[in-house]
Image (spheres, rainbow, N blue to C red):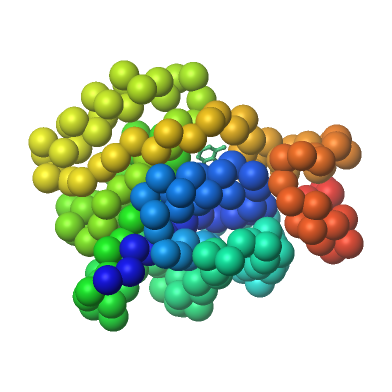
């Protein structure tokens, strides 16, 4: 049995917050692999707000994870033409790899909106959810309450991921890049180079 982390996201662009979540999940839950899975056509994000192409987002993720032995790019959702829902993706993985245990890694904002995801009651039986702090509002106490609610209502297996707060988001990075601010230290250098070379997020 392998322990596999799933780090789903839009990654528009990928940043150090995503990498920190995956690193801590890997370390604290002794994961064998973490699959970074950019979404293609997510139901819960307005597609008009996705700035980079699927190919660019995948390339940025590849560059970001290239130094990590256990991380890999999973393009299952990117390749799908229809809307991908997490429950469907995870049911598919469970069918392919019934022996393995999946850990679905999310930040606090996702933990608080997860009940709005399509058929979330079908996502919970497929995996353990690892939920990380995102900002001061997502304190241990508030997150604990949300976890108890979801556990009671759906029988979900949700654990807190004890990451340091990494104050970075893709939308703030897009704004910084547009305003020509320095994004050094917030994302891997190779991703910054790629963004400048391809003139992404400049207008
Ligand atoms: P945006 O700012 O455009 O909403 P984002 O920074 O939240 O994007 P996503 O790719 O949508 O990036 O995030 C994927 C997952 O990573 C989500 O579950 C999100 O909560 C989590 N995440 C992203 N950034 C952080 C962070 N700094 N700390 C903790 N979790 C994070």
Residue 94: give x, y in percent of width and height. Answer: 25, 72
Residue 83: give x, y in percent of width and height. Answer: 40, 67
Q: Nearer the viewer, residue 131 or 199?
A: 131
Single out the residue that lies furthest toward the bottom: 96
Vertical position of residue 28 compared to residue 36: above or below = above
Q: Can the viewer see residue 68 in this picture?
A: yes
Q: What residue appears at the point 41 percent right and 73 percent down from the top-left corner?
A: 82
| Side of 44 relative to 114 (left or right) | right
Q: Can the viewer see residue 85 in this picture?
A: no
Q: What residue appears at the point 82 percent right and 48 percent down from the top-left corner?
A: 203
| Side of 174 relative to 130 (left or right) | right
Q: What residue appears at the point 62 percent right and 30 percent down from the top-left corner?
A: 167
Q: What residue appears at the point 53 percent right and 49 percent down from the top-left corner?
A: 23
Count the marks.
0
Residue 174: give x, y in percent of width and height. Answer: 72, 43
Residue 121: give x, y in percent of width and height. Answer: 18, 52
Q: Nearer the viewer, residue 101 or 125?
A: 101
Picture quadrant of residue 68: bottom right
Q: Nearer the viewer, residue 50 or 150?
A: 150
Task: Please identify the quadrant where the N terminus is shown.
Answer: bottom left
Vertical position of residue 156 compared to residue 88: above or below = above
| Side of 185 relative to 121 (left or right) | right
| Side of 60 relative to 121 (left or right) | right
């Amino acid at each position: 049995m392998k322990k596999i982390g799933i780090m789903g996201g839009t990654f528009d662009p990928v940043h150090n917050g995503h990498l920190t979540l995956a690193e801590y999940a890997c370390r604290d839950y002794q994961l064998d692999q973490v699959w970074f899975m950019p979404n293609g056509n997510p139901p819960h994000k307005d597609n008009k707000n996705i700035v980079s192409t699927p190919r660019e987002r995948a390339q940025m993720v590849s560059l970001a994870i290239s130094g990590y032995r256990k991380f890999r790019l999973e393009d299952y959702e990117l390749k799908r033409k229809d809307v991908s829902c997490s429950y469907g993706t995870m049911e598919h993985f469970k069918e392919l790899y019934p022996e393995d245990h999946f850990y679905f890694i999310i930040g606090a904002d996702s933990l608080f909106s997860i009940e709005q995801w399509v058929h979330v009651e079908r996502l919970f039986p497929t995996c353990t959810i690892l939920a990380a702090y995102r900002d001061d509002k997502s304190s241990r106490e508030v997150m604990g309450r949300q976890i108890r609610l979801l556990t009671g209502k759906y029988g979900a297996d949700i654990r807190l991921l004890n990451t340091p707060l990494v104050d970075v988001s893709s939308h703030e990075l897009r704004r910084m890049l547009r305003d020509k601010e320095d994004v050094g230290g917030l994302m891997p250098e190779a991703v910054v180079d790629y963004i400048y070379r391809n003139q992404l997020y400049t207008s």
